[in-house]
Image: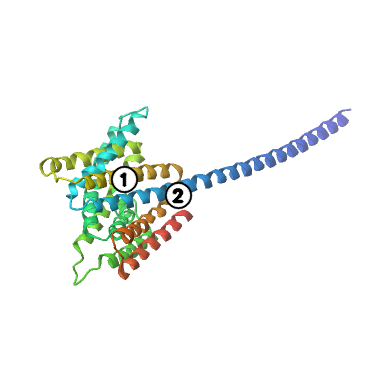
Amino acid sequence: MTAKTGKMEKTDMTNLVGKDTELKKVDDLMEQKRDRKGAMETRKGGISKHTKAIGFVILNSLGFAGMTFFVRLSGEVPTMQKVFFRNIVALFIAIILLMRTEEKFHFKKETMGYVLLRCITGCAGMILNFWAIDHLALADANILNKMSPFFAMIMSILILREIPKRFEWGCIIVAFIGVAFIVKPTAGIASVPALMGLLGGLGAGTAYTFLRKATSRGERGTVVVFCFALFCTLATLPNLIFNFYPMTGEQWLCLGLAGCCAAVGQLAITAAYTLAPAKEISVFDYSQVIFASLLGILFLNEVPDAFSLIGYAIVIVTAVVKWRYALKE
């Protein structure tokens, strides 16, 4: 009986183990099926969000190309006055957006140093960029400002302690070769407006690096936009008070439209980066150069010369290659 009982218990145990194994296999198959289904749903959702994000980036590019166009159309209005009206519109929009949030105007004290540095460098970059817009072909001014991502990689060494890889250093060098075709140095001396436009890109790239530092520590993007618009408005207000340039109705309209276009661009890029990572969509921001070129050709009779076209191609292709490299990482 004991031997028979032991044999029965052994058989029962074998059956139980076999059933458990079969159940485990079924569970594994069900889990794999759920994973595949979830992955397909995520992929479908990702494609949808990714497409929307690209659309928002292109809308941002159109907005900022429109901003530079209307800044140019405003004519002889001083640069500081143009910067003021561009930012006063953005300031009101940022206030409205913050008022609709639960946290209102609350900010993190530990990030304000980085936000202030973002405001200083960004404001300096904007002033230089606006001055360049008045003295360069519209597309040239836009592409020089779009050197900001490459400058951001360089400034990340000092600010974020991030060392670019060899491939990224190669991209920076090639991009600057492209810039040389646009700046057109002669006898060792480059065009002053082009250099100012390039320095504007440096200011923007440095500002983006400080922005990353602030947001990585938990600061809200809307707070940064508000602080930046407020800083630029206050920084240019004294010049507006003491050196106000009387404007025609057309100039008021142009600067108002420039502010609206900038606000559209700012809101669009904020929406884009909430839908998809920057490394996946940032390259589409270079469509701004295409829009600026078209506006310059159609309305300002500005046809880029061969050297500028070569420069555009080098910078944009380098950005595309860098983008594809980032996607593979």
Q: Which of the 4 image quarters holds residue 276?
A: top left
The numbered dot on residue 101 is none
What colouring does the structure picture have? rainbow
Residue 223: give x, y in percent of width and height.
Answer: 31, 36
What's the residue at 17%, 43% (across, down)? 236
Mark identifier at residue 54: 2
Taking 114 as reference, is 179 above or below it?
A: below
Asked which quadrant contains residue 106, the reply is top left
Q: Is residue 155 placed above or below 178 in the rendered structure?
A: above
At x 33%, y 52%, the residue is: 65
Where, quadrant-wise, is the N terminus in this rendering?
top right
Secondary element at tag 2:
helix
- Residue type, numbered disc 2: Ile
Quickly name the residue at label 1.
262
Asked whether disc 2 touches disc 1, contact meaning CB atoms under 8 Å apart, the reply is no
Amino acid, disc 1:
Ala
Count of numbered badges drawn on the protein: 2
Q: Nearer the viewer, residue 145 or 75?
A: 75
